[in-house]
Amino acid sequence: MTLHPMMLEMSKLLGQMNGWIDKAEAHAASKGYDVNTLLHARLAPDMLPLVRQFQNACDNAKFAAAFTTGREPPSHPDTEQTFVEVRARIASVIDYLGTFTAASFEGTDAREVKRPRWEGKSMRATDYFVEQALPNFFFHLNMAYAILRHNGVELGKRDYIGQLSFRRG
Amino acid sequence: MTLHPMMLEMSKLLGQMNGWIDKAEAHAASKGYDVNTLLHARLAPDMLPLVRQFQNACDNAKFAAAFTTGREPPSHPDTEQTFVEVRARIASVIDYLGTFTAASFEGTDAREVKRPRWEGKSMRATDYFVEQALPNFFFHLNMAYAILRHNGVELGKRDYIGQLSFRRG
């Protein structure tokens, strides 16, 4: 196998976030507050607010695919201020991930990744994906979930995991 | 590649949790509270408390390795009530994961996983790992992090990501 199934899973989980936003909007409507207020919510004053958790989940999925396969990722300038804009960001990244195939991820054990802030060091592309991009993706995805849940949005594990590839036994 | 690098990453991240517990103990000592109080903390009244987040992170790593490779996992009865016991649980699962090699994960595309609550349905072992065990592992790992952070424990991203496999460029 290649890393492609992991990337498909990241793309699927980014899509799950749209369902979370649906539930946030329903919660805001039922309580009578502006849903975009939630984008400023944090779990601790020195943690990133919700909007940054969404942005960083998107970025880590994008970076995972691009840097592991030797592409330059598209730029997203982190200007979102509404859930409408967050949905557009998610859609843009899902579209981008859709341009990758299993073949894109062949040879990641031999490819090197370098990032400006690594000061000349490099990582094997597979290691970058597994040790850096994937855990960071899950971190921001889950912090977004935790912030929404902590603020009363009625999310459950099914909203997180989504559809599974079951077979009839 | 096989799923083995992903499993090594899960094992590493379980080990990171020991550092989180170190910081929780330091926080409790500096504030003068019983550290084990934190094990009952939740982000929302209908979410699982911290102790269950630790237990479920351990279980999902164990299940990922066992069910994907056709083994029966060891039982852990979820009786932990102190951080000392949580550390022992983590150590036990890390030891168990250490019994798997890359060869253990060969053929996961052809292996089927069945679980009692799936009512006769099955999943391809690779799909089970990628769609179910891994996202659940990261969910509980990150909820543990979020609960500690929300309660003032001074964790940072480095405590989460840990050491990276850098090479000199």
Image (spheres, coloured by chain):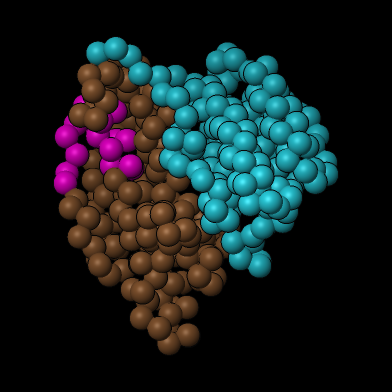
Chain colours: A cyan, B brown
Q: Is residue A54 visible?
A: yes
Total residue callouts: 0
From this viewpoint, is residue A14 visible?
no
- The image quadrant that residue A43 belongs to is bottom right
Residue shown at 28% from the left, 19% from the top: B122
Q: Position of residue B121 (x, y in %)?
A: 27, 18
Q: Nearer the viewer, residue B96 or A155?
A: A155
Q: Is residue B110 magenta?
A: no
Residue B108 vs A90, above or below: the answer is above
Residue at horizontal 78 percent and vertical 37 percent from the top: A85
What residue lies at 80% left-to-right and 46% top-to-bottom?
Answer: A81
* Residue A97 x/y as whole percent: 65, 23
The region drawn magenta spans B60-75
Quadrant assignment, res B167: top right
The residue nearer to you, when weighing A63 against B100, is A63
- In terms of depth relative to the viewer, which is nearer, A44 or A113? A44
Task: Out of B88 and A83, give the one closest to the viewer.
Answer: A83
Q: In the rendered view of the protein, which quadrant contains the N terminus of chain B?
A: top left
